[in-house]
Amino acid sequence: MRPNLTKDISVEGFKDFYWLKEELQSFCKENEISSSGSKIEISNRIETFLRTGEIKNPTRKSKANKKMEPQVDLSLDTVITENHRCSQNVRAFFKTVIPKFHFSTYIQNYFKNNVGKTYCDVVDAWYEEKERKKDPSYKKIIAPQFEYNQFIRDFFADPKNQGKSREKAIKAWNEIKKLPGSHKYTSN
């Protein structure tokens, strides 16, 4: 039986169960903890609070402290900087080069991890990713906070579940998320 998420829950009890982001945010508001950020960031703040009573503030840098870059004419020679923003202006530029361009997770991460490279490199990375997606074995990486998505993918990857409905997968998820421990799909 899943316990209630209160400040009296043990750290182990908290970590053993699946919590919706909305539940985590509600707990934060009740305990005057910041509820902003990703599910993982919020969970880490709650864990710290349960362990020590300490209220940690988000570690994100304030936008006011970031130096805004001057508006520049964008070209394939534009260099990716540390403060790069995936803005409407940048999207509009890439749509002139790649008509079906959008900011996929892969491309957003490419910008973050390739400071110093150029927009020409981004175009190459876009087309390389497009080619990878043509491979039938290609699977997008699912970030750890998306446990439900990973469970559903793994459920349908199990040959025993071939032909089963999405409703059956969701039912299986709803059953496992109530239990303590791992919420990963396992074949029974």
Image: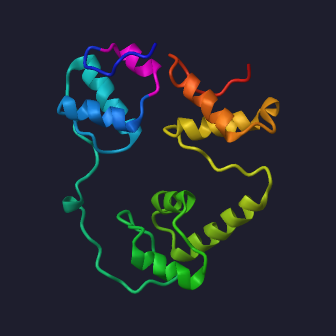
Question: Relative to the observer, which residue lies in front, 141 or 114?
Answer: 141
**Quadrant of res 88:** bottom left
Magenta stretch holds residue 95: no
**Quadrant of res 73:** bottom left
- Residue 63 shows up from this direction: yes
Q: Residue at x 26, y 42 (%)?
A: 58
- Residue 77 shows up from this direction: no
- Taking 158 as reference, is 151 left or right? left
Magenta stretch holds residue 12: yes
- Taking 19 as reference, is 77 left or right? right
Q: Residue at x 60, y 81 (%)?
A: 99
Colouring method of the image: rainbow
- Taking 187 as reference, is 82 left or right? left
Q: List x then y, in percent, for residue 21.
A: 39, 37
Q: List x then y, in percent, for residue 159.
A: 82, 33
In the image, is residue 79 above or below residue 162? below
The quarter of the rendered structure image containing the C terminus is: top right
In the image, is residue 121 above or below residue 13? below
In the image, is residue 74 above or below residue 2? below
Q: Which residues are magenta?
A: 9-18
Q: List x then y, in percent, for residue 156.
A: 73, 38
Question: Relative to the observer, which residue lies in front, 106 or 184?
Answer: 184
Q: Residue at x 42, y 21 (%)?
A: 15
Q: Residue at x 58, y 44 (%)?
A: 142
Question: Relative to the observer, which residue lies in front, 28 or 107?
Answer: 28
Q: How many marks?
A: 0
Query: Magenta part mainly helix, strand or loop?
Result: helix
